[in-house]
Image (cartoon, rainbow, N blue to C red):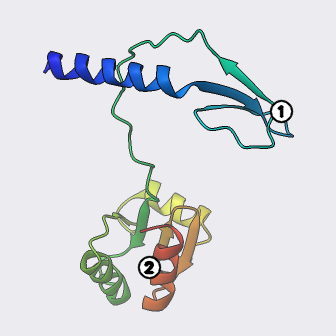
Amino acid sequence: MRTMLLLSMLLLANTVAQAGIYKWFDDAGNVYYGDEPPPEAQVQTLDDITISTVPIREMAPPAKARVVIYTTQRCGYCVRAKQHLAQRGIDYDERDVERSAEHRKEFRALGGNGVPLIRVGDQVMKGYRKPNLDKMLTTAGL
């Protein structure tokens, strides 16, 4: 494994050394580095570069919008909304507003006066309509 890593680094260093590294600025003053600058750019060639090996951390995927559904035990539309989310394979947090004062407080702060109230990221839907929920989910990238 170490041998493969060392060979990869040597190959990369050789490729970089042959290609040349350039530094240029755009009109806004942003700095760019690369092996092929745009033709109209004022270019500075970087002859003396140091290649360092820094461990690359596994990058976390972008945070998905969180889906929260405020419900009660006897709400038929709540059941339908939860079934729809499950059919689409979307995880959600269910918050029963009858059983939890904290959830009821969140519900009221979102303007809730009837259930279900569905929050997808920063979007809020009062009630349940499948096309509207699908649109919210799509907008949120889910």
- Is the C-beta separation of discs 2 and 1 under 8 Å? no
The residue tagged with tag 2: helix, strand or loop? Answer: loop
Q: Which residue is mark 2?
A: 116
The residue depicted at 71 percent of the width and 43 percent of the height is: 38
Measured in 3D between alpha carbons, the distance from the residue under mark 2 to the one under mark 1, in whole angstroms, is: 50 Å
- Kindly state the secondary structure of the residue where label 1 is placed: loop
Quadrant (top left, top right, bottom left, bottom right) of the N terminus: top left
Indicate the amino acid at tag 2. Answer: Pro
Examine the image and state in which quarter residue 111 appears. bottom right
In the displayed structure, 15 sits above or below 48; it is below
What residue sits 41% from the left and 68% below the top? 142
Q: Where does the image place residue 62, in percent across and percent down from the top left?
A: 45, 49
Is residue 13 left or right of 22 when viewed as pictured?
left
Q: Decide if residue 97 is in sight here.
A: no
Within 10 Å of disc 2 (Cα), the crowding (few <14, some 14-19, many 20+) is many
Q: Amino acid at mark 1?
A: Gly
Residue at point 46%, 80% (across, down) = 115
Q: What mark, if any, has residue 29 been given in the picture?
A: 1
Residue 71 appears in which quarter of the rendering? bottom left
Which of 86 and 106 lies nearest the eye of the viewer?
86
In this rendering, the count of numbered labels is 2
Q: Can residue 128 be seen by looking at this rendering?
A: yes
Residue 95 locus on image (x, y percent): 37, 64
Task: Determine whether, in the image, residue 83 is placed left or right of residue 138.
Answer: left
Label 2 vs 1, first from the N-terminus: 1
**Location of residue 64 with respect to 44 vertically, above or below:** below
Residue furthest right as drawn: 27
Measuring from the top left, give residue 21's x and y in whole percent. 59, 25
Residue at horizontal 60%, vertical 33%?
A: 34
Q: Residue furthest left?
A: 1
